[in-house]
Image (cartoon, helix red, strand yellow):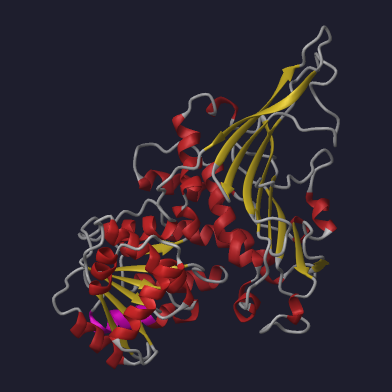
């Protein structure tokens, strides 16, 4: 479809489907409150759900959300926020629901529709918006996961494009809204020293670990339909890989960034069984909503190769899981040792230290560290490795949903996924979604099954984040 003439025009209403759900209560309402406080949000916010709520019940729900978020509440701001809210109840499959929504939008010409609903309902709501005529000059904001495999992603894209042009479709991955993720892109291309060594000639391997020290938290039914590979790796971790692996954009603009990220996904070698180790924490099958013989993974480790000029033969090791020792996300880019061993300790043997590396901490706080070797005091040429550590946490940072919703309402697509990139990422994992080894059990509080070590090269070992 051709670009919409409204691609950078500000929306004049926000419609939230699934407004009574957990996502909206935990993340969206607090973000909208902060946008009101900053003076960014002053348009109607219309909640839609199947629950037979009143407008007053919705406002009480929103107030409870803001209070539980830990926000310092300004009563004047809260009153302004609640004054924007209204409610439309009804079944998403019922034409009458969209007719009622149309009446609520009578004085609105450019709405944004945010689908904070189960993925199984995305197509239903999108087609309902199209059939009712509400999609004209509108945007649609879709929560992840966008599909559950390549075929369903393509089907959903086709359905979305039958109603909305591509530049009116905003696919949310909240990880792209994190300050630390944005800093990866900035750090790479705002510093000239990095580019000469950011390639297969100097980089030995790259590791990305996203660890959580808690389980599925009463989300058994959801996790049984998703699993770690779909829930975290194909979206969150692949987005981090793309920012680290992409070539410099040809010009300043989000389309140029999207072009380079899509090239990375297309260059990724499709996964094979031998590239993947799936784990399941002991006790998962006892969780509510989980099958007693479940083979769903709560841990996933994989070896990824990117067949590009820059990254040919450099292994990328990705790992994520539930009930691991800590909650943290870190990237470790390990450099190759010097080509000639001039000092006995300048290239430590395996297991006795790493070569130089660059470390990005994404959570629980943002930081960048560079490890270098320095000579110890004395006559001998013996040294030690030290980290130059830069804490990058800043007060008053925007939250991911605050940033993403503001971007969508203004038509800024820089932090959203594009159709070709979504499908290319699914193409990488598609071969192993159904063809894989059984899950390996692991104890709660460990770093997953021991079999994950088999993915590493002879001289490689996993980097376990320490958020302290």
Q: Is residue 81 left or right of residue 443?
A: left
Front in this rendered view, residue 56 or 427? 56
Q: Residue at x 86, y 30 (%)?
A: 349
Q: Is residue 62 left or right of residue 267?
A: left
Read off the magenta span: 125-133
Q: Is residue 1 above or below residue 381?
A: below
Question: Residue 384, image x and y in percent?
Answer: 77, 23
Front in this rendered view, residue 86 or 185? 86
Q: Main secondary structure of the magenta part?
A: helix
Question: Residue 365, image x and y in percent?
Answer: 56, 47
Q: Is residue 242 above or below residue 284?
A: above
Q: Is residue 272 visible?
A: yes
In the picture, the quarter occupied by the C terminus is top right
Q: Quadrant of residue 309?
A: top right
Q: Quadrant of residue 149?
A: bottom right
Question: Residue 185, image x and y in percent?
Answer: 47, 41
In the picture, the quarter occupied by the N terminus is bottom left
Q: Residue at x 45, y 65 (%)?
A: 69
Q: Is residue 457 above or below residue 410?
A: above
Front in this rendered view, residue 455 or 157? 455
Q: Is residue 89 above or below residue 295?
A: below
Count numbered badges in the picture.
Answer: 0
Q: Is residue 269 left or right of residue 259?
A: right
Front in this rendered view, residue 312 or 88? 88
């Amino acid at each position: 479809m051709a670009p919409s003439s409204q691609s950078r025009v500000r929306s004049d209403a926000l419609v939230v489907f699934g407004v009574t759900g957990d996502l909206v209560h935990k993340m969206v309402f607090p973000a909208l409150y902060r946008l009101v406080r900053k003076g960014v949000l002053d348009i109607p916010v219309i909640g839609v759900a199947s629950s037979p709520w009143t407008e007053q019940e919705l406002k009480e729900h929103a107030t409870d959300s803001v209070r539980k978020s830990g926000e310092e509440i300004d009563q004047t701001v809260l009153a302004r926020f609640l004054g924007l809210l209204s409610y439309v109840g009804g079944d998403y499959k019922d034409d009458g629901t969209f007719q009622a929504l149309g009446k609520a939008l009578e004085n609105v010409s450019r709405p944004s529709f945010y689908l904070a609903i189960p993925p199984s309902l995305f197509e239903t709501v999108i087609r309902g918006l199209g059939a009712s005529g509400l999609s004209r000059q509108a945007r649609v904001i879709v929560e992840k996961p966008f599909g559950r495999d390549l075929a369903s992603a393509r089907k959903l894209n086709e359905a979305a494009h039958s109603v909305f042009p591509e530049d009116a479709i905003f696919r949310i991955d909240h990880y792209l809204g994190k300050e630390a993720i944005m800093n990866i892109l900035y750090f790479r291309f705002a510093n000239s020293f990095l580019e000469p060594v950011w390639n297969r000639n100097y980089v030995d391997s790259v590791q990305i670990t996203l660890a959580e020290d808690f389980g599925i938290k009463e989300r058994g039914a959801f996790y049984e339909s998703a699993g770690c590979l779909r829930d975290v790796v194909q979206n969150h971790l692949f987005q981090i890989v793309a920012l680290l692996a992409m070539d410099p954009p040809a010009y300043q603009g989000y389309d140029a960034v999207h072009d380079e990220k899509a090239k990375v996904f297309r260059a990724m070698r499709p996964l094979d069984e031998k590239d993947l180790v799936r784990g399941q924490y002991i006790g998962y099958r006892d969780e509510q909503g989980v099958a007693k013989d479940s083979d769903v993974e709560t841990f996933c480790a994989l070896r990824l190769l990117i067949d590009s000029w820059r990254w040919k033969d450099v292994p990328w090791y990705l790992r994520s899981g539930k009930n691991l020792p800590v909650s943290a996300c870190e990237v470790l880019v390990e450099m190759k040792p010097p080509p000639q061993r001039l000092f006995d300790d300048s290239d430590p043997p395996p297991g006795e230290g790493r070569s130089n590396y660059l470390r990005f901490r994404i959570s629980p706080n943002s930081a960048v560290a560079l490890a270098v070797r320095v000579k110890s005091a004395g006559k001998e040429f013996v040294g030690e490795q030290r980290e130059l550590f830069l804490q990058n946490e800043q007060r008053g940072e925007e939250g991911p949903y605050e940033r993403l919703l503001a971007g969508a309402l203004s038509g800024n697509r820089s932090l959203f996924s594009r159709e070709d990139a979504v499908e290319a990422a699914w193409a990488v994992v598609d071969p192993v979604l159904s063809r894989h080894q059984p899950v390996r059990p692991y104890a709660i509080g460990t770093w997953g099954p021991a079999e994950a070590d088999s993915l590493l090269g002879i001289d490689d070992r996993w980097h376990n984040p320490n958020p302290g």
